[in-house]
Amino acid sequence: MDLLTSVILGIVQGISEFLPISSTGHMILASHLMGLTHTEFLKSFEIAIQAGTILSVVFLYWRNLLVDVEVIKRIIVAFIPTGIFGLTLYKLIKGYLLGSEAVVLWSLLLGGIFLVVFELWYKEKEDATGEIRDLSYKNALIIGLFQSIAMIPGVSRSASTIVGGLILGLKRKTIVEFSFLLAVPTMLAATVYDLIKTGTHMSLPEIHYLAAGFITAFIVALLSIKFLLRFIQTHTFIAFGIYRITFVLLWFLFLKI
């Protein structure tokens, strides 16, 4: 890895983290396209670089995260399933699933098909929940269970939480913003836990690469969040589903994986 590569991966991470297209999947496939060996450092880089996108959410939503107690409580409840499954399945996820292009591609494809079918079926109810503080603790926990599915690379954390929230009767903007907020403890826990496991083994150049990716991901994620909030005002997620399907088909067609 070099400085340019870390910046490119930061751009990929910043664009894809909050869109329902799987940032982890895109990071893995981008690494493959650039011919990077999936070393322990690269796996850690792909996890830790998420700290940049965490900061973008904190920057935009610090009042919800630091002041609004009702919102904070629901974020904590929703994080519980991911925290439990993440600790339990850490070795399996990092050792076998991260870096598996087959898992990523199938997850992107099936997830894309599901998004299209779901949006064609889904109709928002008039009494849909419009405020995060009105979300029941039970439904917050269920949304957390939906998020846990995204531990499979390529599924997309944002897609799974958003779909879960829509099924449970939240307004589109409400669940999208809750998904942003839920990303903070989720990605922070994953980043800190992984760095505790491997951070002491990083060389000085690797720390520089991580810092470059972090800064890039932060800036690009800010733009990505603002784009998605504007996009959902007049669009469904069908376009993202079609993108996922097209991406996989082109990958198979040109790279023959």
Image (cartoon, helix red, strand yellow):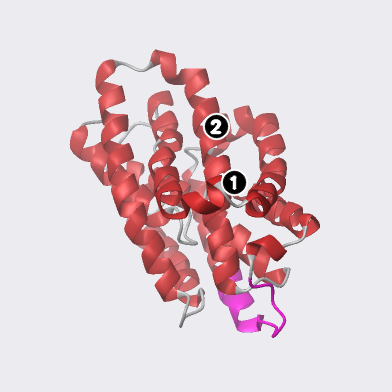
Which image quarter is the N terminus in? top left
Residue at 59% x, 35% y is: 93
Residue 201, image x and y in percent? 40, 14
Number of other residues with Cα within 10 Å of mark 1, as a class: few under 14, some 14 to 19, many 20 or more: some
Picture residue at 61% right of the left edge, 59% below the top: 160
**SS of the residue at dot 1?**
loop
Q: Amino acid at mark 1?
A: Ile
**Residue receiving disc 2:** 94
- For residue 133, above or below residue 33: below
User: Toward which corner of the image does residue 174 lie, by quadrant?
Assistant: bottom right
* Residue holding disc 1: 152
**Is 188 on the left-hand or right-hand side of 39?**
right
User: Residue 85's image quarter?
Assistant: top right
Q: Are marks 2 and 1 in contact (CB under 8 Å)?
A: no
Percent of width and height locating residue 75:
64, 49
Q: Quadrant of residue 37?
A: top left
Taking the magenta stretch, the answer to whether it contains residue 215 is no
From where the camera sits, is residue 156 visible?
no
In the image, the segment drawn in magenta is: 113-130
Q: Amino acid at mark 2?
A: Lys
Residue 107 is situated, as x and y percent measured from the top left of the image, at 56, 55
Outermost residue toward the right? 138
Of residues 94 and 235, the one nearer the viewer is 235
Residue 109, position as x, y percentages in the image: 52, 62
Mark 2 → mark 1, Cα distance in angstroms:
10 Å
Instruction: Tell me if residue 68 comes above or below residue 85 in the rendering.
Output: below
Of residues 143 and 202, which is closer to you in this image?
A: 143
Position of 237 with respect to 243 (left or right) is right
